[in-house]
Image (spheres, helix red, strand yellow):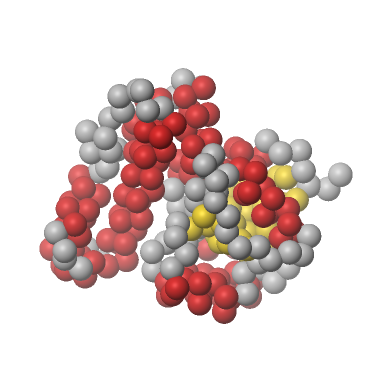
Amino acid sequence: MDKLRILLIETSRLLRNGIISLLNEQVDITAVASTGTRSALEQAKAFSPQIVLLAPGTRTQKTQRMLVLLNKQLPQAKIVVIDFVLAREGAVVYEGAGIAGYLRRDASLEVFLHTIRSVANGAKLLPSSSQDSILKLIVEDAFREDRIQSIYKAIRLTNLEYQVAAILASGKSIQSAATLLHLTAPTIRAHLRNTIDKLTLYLQLESAFPTRRLKSPNE
């Protein structure tokens, strides 16, 4: 049986490794991962993915450019976007780019796999919701394998991420944060996205194991 070839583009190492592990456990799927569009295109030349799972950053314009490039360089591949909340601006970009599917980051493994397989068969699917999220499954797997310290390390905010979060929480703009920290706005957005990922994982930890005292992301 020919396996469904999937390329995941995800910058978060923890999520990237976790999702790839879950996908490669399926008998009908083979998956590889990349951290960005350029390396993804290089991998795609040899891998020829049928599905591209794209986890975009916080910049809508950058996401739009990535989708255009992916459609141009990988016309045979169907793109499924993985994101948090589908804002109106993002919905317009995705619709214009002709993506084949959309998944929330907290989609269940069942919904995740169903969407991928359905898209591979020609369907176009909208997001669904469930209590047993992929993030929760990644966390539970880490606990089963006694890798809790690696989870703590993964969700710990760096000093710079903490500074970015504190500045933005005070009401200042991304550009203001960039000026204060002597960084570029895209760099601030990248740190913001990493912080959101880590806080989401922390909330999944608390939800999955409510009786266990967990370290907060900045401890």
Question: In x, y percent, where is residue 146?
Answer: 46, 20
Q: Residue at x 54, y 72 (%)?
A: 94
Task: Say whether residue 17 is visible.
Answer: no
**Relative horizontal placement of residue 123, taking residue 109 as reference (left or right):** right
Question: In x, y percent, where is residue 77?
Answer: 69, 65
Instruction: Quadrant for the C terminus, please.
Output: top left
Q: Residue at x 31, y 28 (%)?
A: 214
Instruction: Quadrant for the N terminus, please.
Output: top right
Q: Where 213 sits versus 158, above or below?
A: above
**Relative horizontal placement of residue 148, taking residue 77 as reference (left or right):** left
Question: In x, y percent, where is residue 120?
Answer: 74, 59
Q: How many marks?
A: 0
Q: Residue at x 30, y 55 (%)?
A: 191
The quadrant where residue 125 appears: bottom right
* Relative depth, front residue between 177 and 171: 171
Residue at the extreme bottom: 96
Q: Residue at x 43, y 68 (%)?
A: 87
**Relative horizontal placement of residue 56, taking residue 80 as reference (left or right):** left
Q: Where 107 sits versus 58, above or below?
A: above
**Relative horizontal placement of residue 172, taking residue 205 as reference (left or right):** left
Question: In x, y percent, where is residue 169?
Answer: 19, 57
* Relative depth, front residue between 129 and 184: 129
Task: Say whether residue 94 is visible.
Answer: yes
